[in-house]
Image: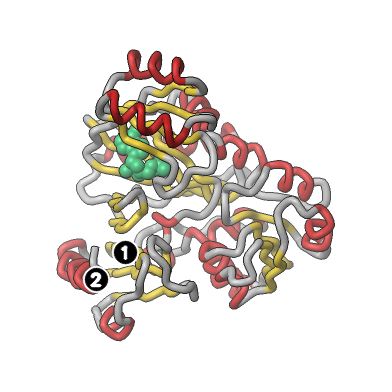
Amino acid sequence: MIVGLLGGGQLGRMLALAGYPLGLGFRALDHSADAPTGRLAELMVAGFDDREALVRFSSGLGLVTYEFENVPVETVRFLSERVEVYPPPEALEAGQDRLTEKRFFQKLGIPTPPFAAVDTRDDLDFALQRIGFPAVLKTRRFGYDGKGQFVLRAEEDARQAWGALEGRPLLLEGFVRFDREISVIAVRGKRGETAFYPPVENHHEKGMLRLSLAPAPNLPPHLKQQGEDYALRALNALNYVGVLAIEFFEFGGQLYANEMAPRVHNSGHWTIEGAEVSQFENHLRAITGLPLGSTDLIGSSAMVNLIGELPPIEALASIPGAHVHLYGKEPRPDRKLGHVTLRARDPQTLVPRIRQVRDLSGI
Ligand code: AMP
């Protein structure tokens, strides 16, 4: 079967790598001829709004999935008239707008930071009165890796942020003084069966994921349960098929949902070496109707993103338990070029090795 991938980035590339042993083929659609998936799968270069290209893209595919969540919903709906698309377009739609997403969590009883829609300067003043400083002003759509958002600590910040974001639909959120950030990677199959990877602790730099620790160290059992329970509610509400990632803030013994991604996720890359079956393989198993694979851990893992420039690969590869992944992208500031997963029998052994990667990659 040939699986169509909307988006040809590193996630598509890792999906293809996981799918070849299962006998799957891949065709990616991306606007860039340099898209990383193109190095190892068929790549069609076209815009997501090019209907004629979409018809050619879908021809002969067994199904379509996405590796990028800002694909226009109209594109996915157009394709879904020709070929099965997983996860469901409704999930894509729910996650594309931060306001819809927060309301979705709220409806399911999943706690979130306080939030308010902002379209006018009056809305912003009113929302700030209600939520108070500090707060975060974000664009509702097309924000990722911390882009399109401002932390507001005082009136002056509000004025500046408004100057930069005015005219776009916005969301104001209370700033959470979180203890840490946690994500849950969950998967649901076509018969409604589910599986969950253990929650992971994430560290961001400039809004971008830099380090994930799997499993999240010292996570109280009730929070592991809470993360799974919230993810299960979201999966079932969307009649979801595939991998879903939800990012949470841990604060005061409780999880608050920040956002979800209807796709494989950067905070799940460690599963390639650190779990019995990776998030990539489980996504493919789910969407092709195979039984889900075990999400059990193999030891402890840490994943470090390589961003902007690459450290010497020999040095990285010489660290015990290191697995180097390079995406074949040209170095550029703030660009994710690859990652390293460190796997060890226990978390203590990981600590000095993480330090080694950190020293090499300049975190
Ligand atoms: P996002 O694009 O919403 O995931 O935001 C990127 C990063 O900004 C998050 O991973 C957090 O580190 C930080 N952030 C976003 N929203 C909030 C918030 N309401 N309170 C505190 N930090 C936040």
Q: Tag 2: Cα neighbours inside 10 Å, few (<14), some, or many (≥20)?
A: many
The amino acid marked with disc number 1 is: Val
- Residue 267, can we see it? yes
Q: Find residue 219 and report its horizontal and vertical position in percent.
A: 24, 44
Q: Quadrant of the C terminus?
A: bottom left
On screen, residue 316 above or below 142: below
Q: Quadrant of residue 64?
A: bottom right
Q: Which mark is residue 26?
A: none
> How many numbered dots are placed on residues in this image?
2
Instruction: Tell whether circle 1 marks a residue whose Cβ is less than 8 angstroms from ligand 1.
Output: no
Instruction: Tell whether circle 2 marks a residue whose Cβ is less than 8 angstroms from ligand 1.
Output: no
Q: Find residue 215 and report its horizontal and vertical position in percent.
A: 29, 54
Q: Earlier in the sequence, mark 1 or mark 2?
A: 1
Determine whether, in the image, residue 301 is placed left or right of residue 117: left
Task: Say which of 153 and 232 sits in front.
Answer: 153
On screen, residue 245 above or below 322: above
On screen, residue 316 above or below 189: below
- Residue 225, can we see it? no
The amino acid marked with disc number 2 is: Val
Q: CA distance from mark 1 to mark 2?
A: 8 Å
Q: Quadrant of residue 192?
A: top right
Q: Quadrant of residue 237?
A: top right
Q: Which residue is mark 1?
A: 304
Q: Quadrant of ligand 1?
A: top left
Q: Which residue is mark 2?
A: 357
Task: Say which of 232 and 202 sits in front.
Answer: 202
Q: Residue at x 22, y 67 (%)?
A: 358
Q: Find residue 127 and report its horizontal and vertical position in percent.
A: 39, 17
Q: Residue at x 56, y 65 (%)?
A: 15
SS category of the residue bearing label 2:
helix
Determine whether, in the image, residue 75 is placed left or right of residue 95: right
Q: Are marks 1 and 2 in contact (CB under 8 Å)?
A: yes
